[in-house]
Image: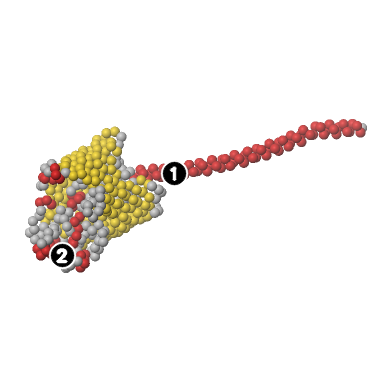
Amino acid sequence: MRKLAMLMAATALSTATPAFADEASLQAEIAALKAQLAAQSQLIAAQSKRLDDLAAQVKDNRELAASASSASVAPSSPPSAPTAVAANQASADASPSLPIGRPAQVAGVSIGSDTTIGGYGEIAYNAYVHDGSRNRADLKRLVLFVGHRFNDKLSFNSELEVEHAIASASDKGEFEVEQAYLNYAFKPSLNLKAGLFLMPFGFLNRNHEPPVFYGVERNEVETRIIPTTWREGGIGLWGDTPIGLSYDVGVTTGFNVAKFDDAGSPLAAAHQELQLAKAADLSVYGSLEYKGVPGLLVGGAVFHGGVVHRNADFREDNTLPNFARINSQVTLWDVHGRWQPKGFDFQALYARGTYSRADKIDSVLLAYNMANNAERPFFPSVFYGWLVQGAYSFPLGGEATLNPFIRYEKFDTQAKLPLGLVADPLNRDRILTVGFSFHPIQVVVVKIDYQKFFENSRNNRFNLGIGYSF
């Protein structure tokens, strides 16, 4: 029995040993699997983080693309509403659309999440028919836009310009700050702006990039009567309403009678440009435009303000004309319309200005000129200008278009002079301009046109120009 018990124990031990071995192996395999799962979990976490980073990068790229798209040129027809950060550019194809009812703002591309840059430039060649010695070529202007968005409500916009390639004391070129203002957007229909900004008159003053307008040279009405680019320092409210109305109203600086130096440009000759501007007399302005019908724009604007500033210039320098006890105001108003049906582009504009008490101002100037052997120009009591223009777009494939146009305009900067003074015939004319614009892409243009001056035919000329915006 003892031997039988020992034999059974030995048999049980021999059969149990492999089971113990299998359990140890199983535990080792479980441990290995746990380690492998831990490693895979770390790998999954890393891959998930990588996917999150890629998603964020895609979102940033989409926002950048959207910013660039909103800052690019708008389609040609119908007129497009400007965006919050890019309202200064418009389509440069067949019938370029103009932002309306709001101040011109920075257009361009984003160089970061908050800052935008852009600009434009143009070069022109003028060939005079009757006097080749007057022919000239000029880098007319190079402009840089810089804007910054501080947050969803507050932004800054600016426009810096160099004219005629060189700006120095001995050259005709100039460096100018044409815009520098803050804008607070309460909502699309209510914005508050403060600083130096463009006046909402006509077509070109707010939208003067070369791909936007027809003709190598800016038209005479929006150069002599509405002084493009006309800007003032002040504060204003503007916005676009849901019913298609755009408005812009405010209080600003104004013109200065003592600066007047060119009878051919009644307002530009007295423009202060916020350069130590006399501000004893402030001005008010307002504009209203309707664009609720696709392809249609109609609107107008008015500006009114004093020009003597309590005789401030004479008080500083008594060698200047003395306008004491003269209270004169300048008023300018315009009406304009645009219709863009299916490739066509029709525009019309009328602008009229007045200087009150021009007779008293000119009496002072007449006496001053006689006493000092001077030739200071006289103030008109009335000046005006108007134009009509038509164009059509021929698509050439891709973005390329060919846009022939014709424009007829009339201006008179001395329509009425007091005291029986005689107007200079050089300060009035009727002009026919015929030509075309070729756009290889929307924001680049080559222009050729011919201008016939009916009153001053010695100014007849051919013009060739190139322009670009970005």
| Residue type (three-letter) at the residue carrying disc 1 | Lys
The picture places residue 193, in percent across and down from the top left corner, at: 32, 56
Q: Quadrant of residue 376?
A: bottom left
Q: Is residue 195 left or right of residue 380?
A: right
The picture places residue 328, in percent across and down from the top left corner, at: 17, 63
Q: How many neighbours does mark 1 have within 10 angstroms: few (below 14), some (14-19), or many (20 or more)?
A: few
Name the residue rendered at 92%, 32% in the picture.
Answer: 1
| Closer mark to the observer between disc 2 and disc 1 | 2
Which quarter of the image is occupied by the C terminus?
A: top left
Q: Could you tell me if the residues under marks 2 and 1 are in contact, i.e. CB atoms within 8 Å?
A: no
Name the residue rendered at 18%, 48% in the picture.
Answer: 220
- Frontmost residue, 155 versus 298: 155
Point out which mark residue 321 bears. Answer: 2
Q: Quadrant of residue 5?
A: top right
Point out which mark residue 86 bears. Answer: none
| Residue type (three-letter) at the residue carrying disc 2 | Pro
Res. 148 visible in picture:
yes
Name the residue rendered at 31%, 49% in the picture.
Answer: 144
The residue singled out by tag 1 in the image is 59
- Frontmost residue, 34 versus 387: 34
Disc tally is: 2
Name the residue rendered at 16%, 44% in the picture.
Answer: 135
